[in-house]
Amino acid sequence: MLLIGLTGGIATGKSSVSSIISSMNLPIIDADLLARQVVEPNKPAYNSILSTFGPSVLLPSGHIDRKKLASIVFNDPVARKKLNTATHPDIRREMLLLVLHHFLRLQRACVLDTPLLFEAGLHKFVHEKVVVYCPEQTQLARLIARDNLTPTEAQSRISSQMPIDQKRSLASILIDNSNSKEDTQKQVEQMVARTLPSKFRTVIVWSLLCVPAALLYGLVKGWETCSGLWARIRARDSIRGGGRVHMD
C-alpha cells in the first residue's frame, strides 16, 4: 500500500487538497482529528495537558479549550514542546492502527494528512511527501480572514511552523494552491494518477507479504504437530520396552 504524506503551512490550503483526495475515494488519516480525539476528557493525553497547563485551559464543559491552548503554545516553544510530548505518542499509535486497517482492506493508497509531517519525523515512513503551498502574503491574508486574527497574531502562528520554503525543499510532490480551485483540483488529480499503484500491483504486494507469514505459521504448526507425534511414538516405544513415561 502506498502511503502518502500530505502537509503544508497553516492556511495554505492543505485541507482543501485533502477534501479533493477524499472525493476520489482514497482514505485519509486526519492527524488534526486524531489530535482532538486523544485529548477527550479522562484520556491519558487530556490528563497530561491538565497537569501541565492547569484548569485554565478547560471549557466549562470540561473539554480542552483548543483556542486558549493554541494561544499559549504558539507563542511559547517550551510550552509547545510539552504539548507535543503529551499528545504525539497517542496520535502516532492511532495513526499506525488506521494504516494497518487500510492495509488489511487492500487499499491501494492511504493519505496521512498532518501539518507536522516533517517536524514530527513522519516523512521517514511515507512513500511520497506532498507539500501544499502558496505565497506568504496570500497565506497571511487567508489566515487573518479564516481565524479572525490580527496581522501580528497571524504572523506569529505562521512563524511558529517550519518555513514553507523548507518544506518545499523536502517534498517529492508540490501542489501550488495560489490560483483557482479548478487549477488545484487538476494538480491533485494528476498527482493521484501518477502515484497511485494499480489494483493488480496492490494484490500482488499484499500476497507477497501474506504468503511468507502464512508459510511461517504453517512451519510453526507443523513443528508442533511433528513434535507431538514424535513424543507419542517415543512414549509408545518406551511402554513396549517396559519403561514408564508420564504424559502431562
Image: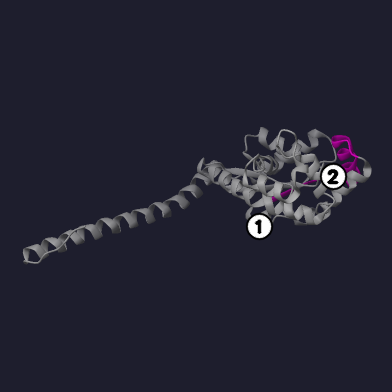
138 inside magenta stretch? yes
Q: Which residue is mark 2?
A: 134
Q: Is residue 217 shown to the viewer in this render?
A: yes
Q: Is residue 40 above or below residue 116?
A: above
Answer yes or no: is residue 13 visible: no
Label 2 to label 1, Cα distance in Å?
A: 24 Å
Q: Nearer the viewer, residue 44 or 156?
A: 44
Q: Is residue 58 above or below residue 126?
A: above
Q: Element at badge 1? A: helix
User: Residue 227 sits in which quadrant?
Assistant: bottom left
| Numbered circles on residues, count | 2
Numbered disc in front, either 2 or 1: 1
Q: Residue 145, image x and y in percent? A: 88, 35
Residue 124, labelled with which disc?
1
Question: Does residue 184 appear left or right of residue 202 in this picture?
Answer: right
Q: Position of residue 192 (x, y in %)?
A: 67, 42
Tell me the SS state at disc 2: loop
Residue under the point 74% across and 34% down: 60
How many other residues sit within 10 Å of disc 1, few (<14), some (14-19) or many (≥20)? few
Q: Which residue is at 62% across, 49% downward?
A: 90
Task: Tell me which residue sits at (78%, 43%) in the image.
Answer: 56
Is 73 magenta? The answer is no
Q: Amino acid at mark 2?
A: Cys
